[in-house]
Each structure stands twice: as structure tokens, then as C-alpha cells.
Image: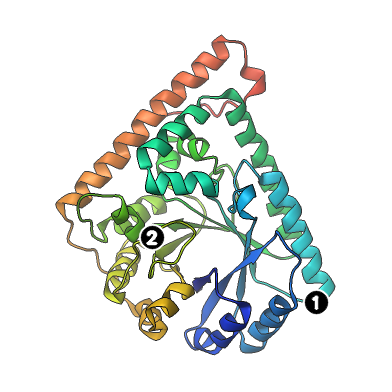
């Protein structure tokens, strides 16, 4: 399984200048490609140059901001059309990529609220989550994403999803409570790979206490037991570049500890976010060297235990409410409108 680096905001000509560096580390480039515009000549040149350098491309397809930016249950149909258009363009230009990456996250506007006003965002998501129409939308989107995966396999492409690590609590509980809460369908689908964004720096941004790479270890140790697809570690954030406000790592050693923790948990494929941040800090070579990290479980901090207990308890409460919702829906005569996943918290 390959390692990879994400590139989101850099002009394609700048990314092209990094291809030799990526080839030297035998890295895949997970390249952000907007579905909101026509595919450019610069993108074509970059894909051709990557092929010449032997750098595999993960096509990280994204919508425009007003449609949520990241694919999810709210924009699945629109994203499906965009994927079809991209595949047709590849064929017409005689270009190739290794896989399509579906970055399954809640819509951009809600993501920004959750990052800057966590409790306000949770209240808004909870209010939306209690709507029967919201649940119906989620399960309808599953059909769209199933068809996307089938279409990709028919043309010889892999389908990778990258998403929040909290989906493993759903998998463990046997429900989709968290996924429906944020409208991110993952476990009902047969992805070729699931990449979990255990961005320790992003957790640290919203916590009043320190955490270590133990969070990374715990999530990937659990993922190995409850997910059936190959699991990849998406780690970061490097620097402060992102679609939402980021504190980010400033020292490669912190990320080296995260990668060591993921390997200690049995996950050996990693993706670093991002090439943009590496250049922001001015030392991309130092950050790429963390791929040589050895497997090592960190010494837990008190904050690690507190955070993990909080995450588990939050999912238990969400699962309990999820079960009550389904019981109420049936009592009100709505079972035919909804997909009943028989939750088992």
C-alpha cells in the first residue's frame, strides 16, 4: 500500500515542480481537482508530467464552496455528475489517475461553524438530525455513492474515501448514528480503502488540555477490528493552511510520533496533509522524512484518557437518541419513508 501527500491550494505548475521530490520518496500525490470549472490545460500538463515521473495520482474531486465543497449526503447527486464528467475528460484526453478520492465531510459552512463555535455547530447539526427527511436524504445518497463506486470499478479505478475517525464508533456499535449526524455515508459502502483523518492538531485546536499521539493509536487500533476495508492513516495538519482555521503542527517530530503510533496500531499506509503546509513552513524535505518513522505507541497523557472517554460517551448518547428516533418514527407511521438500519448501540 502506498504513502501519499495531499495538495489542495497550490497552482498546478507549483505542484509539478515537486514531482521529482515525490518520486524520490515513492509517494502518491492526492491532488485537489475542482469540479466547479472546466478541467484546465495546466491540470492536463501536471497529469502528463506525473505519469512521466512515475508519480501515481489520487484525484481528489471537490465541489465549489456554495455546494458544500466536500461530497456528502447533501450533494451526492451533484458530485456523481461531476465524477462522470471527470472520467469522460480523462478518457477524451487519454489521461489516467490511480484512484478517485471522495473526501466525505459535512458541508463547508457547517464545518467552519463546528471548528470556531463547536457547541453552536453541534446544536445546529442535532436539530437537522432529528428530521425524518434528513435520514431519508442520507440513505438516498448511499445509492448515489454505490453507483459512483460501480462506475469507477468499471473503468479500472479505485474508490477511496477519506473521512472523520469517529465513524469507527458507528462500526463498533452497528449503526450509522454519527454518519447520519454529519451526513457522511461511509460504512454502508464498499470502498477500496478508508482513510481516517486523525488530525491530532485539529483536535488540539478545540481542547483546553494537551493530548499526545495516543489518540492516533487508539483510533487505528479500533479501526483494524471494526472496519472490513483496508485502512489508511491521514495525518496532520502541517502548518496552518486549510479550508477551515487550523493551528497545525510546526515541528515534524509531532507528526513523526503520529505516524509511529499508527504503525504500532497495525496501519502502514499513511497520507500527510499537506504539501501546501510543507511549503508554508519552508522545509518540505524534513516533513517527508517522517515517512521513515518506526512503530511506537506513545506514553498516554491524562488528556488522552479524558478525550477518549468523552468520545465514547458522546457516541453512546447519540446512539441512544438514534434508537429512540427510529422507535418514534415507526410509531408515527413513517417506516416506509426511512431505511431502518436496525441500530444496535
118 sits to left or right of 104: left
Q: Which residue is mark 2?
A: 246
- Name the residue at 50% across, 87% down: 21
Residue 77, by quadrant, is top right
Q: Which mark is residue 94?
A: 1
- Name the residue at 38% across, 70% down: 239
Q: Which mark is residue 180?
A: none
Relative to 48, is 8 above or below? above
Relative to 315, is 147 above or below? below
Look at the numbered disc 2 and give the secondary structure of its residue: loop
120 sits to left or right of 212: right
Classify mark 2: residues with Cα within 10 Å, few (<14), some (14-19) or many (20+). Answer: some
Relative to 205, is 226 above or below? above
Return the x and y of residue 246 as percentages of the image width and height: 38, 60
Residue 163 makes an appearance in the image: yes
- Name the residue at 38% across, 84% down: 283
Amino acid at each position: 500500500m502506498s504513502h501519499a501527500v495531499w495538495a489542495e491550494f497550490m497552482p498546478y505548475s507549483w505542484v509539478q515542480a515537486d514531482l521529482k521530490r515525490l518520486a524520490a520518496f515513492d509517494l502518491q500525490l492526492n491532488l485537489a481537482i475542482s469540479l466547479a470549472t472546466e478541467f484546465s490545460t495546466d491540470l492536463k500538463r501536471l497529469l502528463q508530467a506525473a505519469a512521466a515521473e512515475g508519480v501515481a495520482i489520487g484525484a481528489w474531486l471537490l465541489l465549489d464552496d456554495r455546494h458544500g465543497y466536500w461530497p456528502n449526503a447533501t450533494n451526492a447527486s451533484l458530485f456523481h455528475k461531476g465524477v462522470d464528467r471527470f472520467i469522460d475528460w480523462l478518457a477524451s484526453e487519454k489521461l489516467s489517475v490511480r484512484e478517485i478520492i471522495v473526501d466525505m465531510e459535512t458541508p463547508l459552512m457547517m464545518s467552519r461553524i463546528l471548528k470556531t463555535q463547536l457547541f453552536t455547530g453541534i446544536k445546529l447539526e442535532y436539530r437537522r438530525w432529528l428530521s425524518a427527511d434528513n435520514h431519508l436524504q442520507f440513505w438516498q445518497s448511499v445509492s448515489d455513492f454505490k453507483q459512483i463506486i460501480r462506475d469507477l470499478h468499471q473503468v479500472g479505478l479505485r474508490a477511496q474515501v477519506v473521512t472523520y475517525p469517529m465513524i469507527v464508533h458507528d462500526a463498533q456499535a452497528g449503526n450509522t448514528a454519527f454518519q447520519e449526524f454529519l451526513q457522511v455515508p461511509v460504512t454502508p459502502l464498499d470502498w477500496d480503502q478508508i482513510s481516517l483523518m486523525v488530525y491530532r492538531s485539529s483536535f488540539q485546536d478545540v481542547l483546553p488540555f494537551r493530548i499526545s499521539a495516543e489518540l492516533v493509536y487508539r483510533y487505528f487500533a479500533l479501526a483494524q477490528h471494526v472496519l472490513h476495508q483496508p485502512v489508511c492513516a491521514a495525518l496532520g495538519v502541517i502548518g496552518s493552511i486549510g479550508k477551515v482555521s487550523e493551528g497545525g503542527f510546526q515541528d515534524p517530530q509531532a507528526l513523526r510520533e503520529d505516524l509511529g503510533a499508527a504503525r504500532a496500531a497495525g496501519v502502514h499506509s499513511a497520507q500527510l496533509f499537506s504539501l501546501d503546509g510543507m511549503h508554508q513552513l519552508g522545509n518540505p524535505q524534513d516533513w517527508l522524512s517522517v515517512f521513515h518513522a518506526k512503530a511506537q505507541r506513545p506514553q498516554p497523557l491524562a488528556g488522552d484518557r479524558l478525550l477518549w472517554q468523552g468520545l465514547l460517551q458522546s457516541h453512546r448518547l447519540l446512539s441512544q437518541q438514534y434508537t429512540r428516533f427510529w422507535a418514534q418514527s415507526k410509531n408515527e407511521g413513517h417506516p416506509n419513508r426511512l431505511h431502518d438500519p436496525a441500530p444496535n448501540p
